[in-house]
Amino acid sequence: MVELETRELEYFLALADELHFGRAAARLAIAQPALSKAIRRIETRLGVPLFVRSSRHVELTPAGEALQEHGRHALNAVSAAVQSARRAGDVQAHLRLVLKPGGDAGLLSGILAEYARRPDARRVDILFSGPADRSDFLRDGRADVGLLYAPLDDLDGLAHETLHTEDRVAIVPSGHRLAGRAAVRMSDLEGETLPRWKGVPGGDGTGPEVADVVQLLHMITMRRMIGVLPRSLVEPAPPGLVCVPVADAPPSRLVLAWNEQDRRPLVASFVAAALRPRGYETGSGVGETEVLAGSDDERLELEKGSYPQADRAGHADQQGCLVERGA
């Protein structure tokens, strides 16, 4: 069996991401010749070329693409195992919750208050991340639970429960051709410049790259582009901007997610608190109410430290709110 060390995988993935030996070496804080030698050693051991190299560019071979996909999962699994082992031995461990700034649809305060009333509540550390890496926080163990948006965030390897469903709106500057419409369809947005989200591969955006909603709104105000976001992220609209419902855009779901392999009571207790029966608006604007938790038997299992039958699909910029039991 061919074996690769985690450090070798890190070297390979850095080059696979950057497709440039100089940038990858700088990212790894090693010399470029050392990186080149390590990549050649990996290719020799595997018996297949991973990269096509020329004087002008570097690109992945089919074998390289396969190793990139599975190697990333392997590194995440190793990191998660280390984090889980450390935290399992720490009886005073805090619970770490990751989300994007403002990405809670107004629900987080109520969830934290509900959790603080539980006898086993721990302090909650809030981690704010960029647009693309919240899922990775959960897969590699940097966070225990997260608030993510489906279908925008990648839920592969994560268990999740829907907390809130809402429509999506187009954000346009005042005076834009769509600003006076009661609603639009996706076809109405053809020809408009949409953002490219930093760190998010693919997508339909052709405009400037943005790292967060604040940057996006600033670019829209300058009439450089428009955006399409879940309603709760942008309402009330900032001065000079207008939100127009997109009638045929798939609804956005705010979900509570956690690594599907994580069975710790620490996580189960927070999930149980978040799924307590509560009313919320579905995003339709008509005040419909749903009960988020299931039957009494399901809630009893949550109280015992188990999990609901959740859907299956696993560097913080800032840390904030700390919630103590009884706070």
Image (cartoon, rainbow, N blue to C red):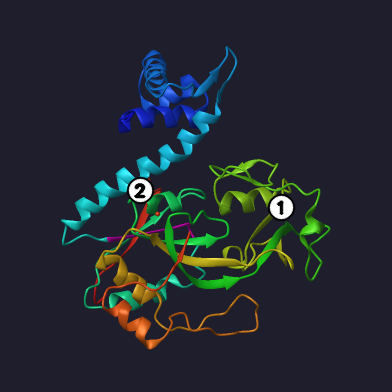
The answer to whether residue 1 is above or below residue 176 is above
Q: Main secondary structure of the magenta part?
A: strand
> What percent of the width, then of the height, locates residue 82?
25, 46
Query: Which residue position is annotated with label 2?
Result: 140
Q: Mark 2 belongs to which amino acid?
A: Asp
For the residue pair 53 and 321, the one nearer the viewer reads as: 53
> What percent of the width, then of the height, locates residue 38?
37, 19
| The magenta segment | 95-101
Residue placed at 48% from the left, 84% from the top? 291
The image quadrant where one finds the C terminus is bottom left
Q: Residues within 10 Å of mark 1 (few under 14, many from 20)?
A: many
Q: Is residue 283 left or right of residue 153?
A: right
State whether residue 290 appears in this view: yes
> What percent of the width, then of the height, locates residue 16?
49, 30
The image quadrant where one finds the N terminus is top left
The answer to whether residue 224 is above or below residue 284 is above
For residue 226, the mark is 1
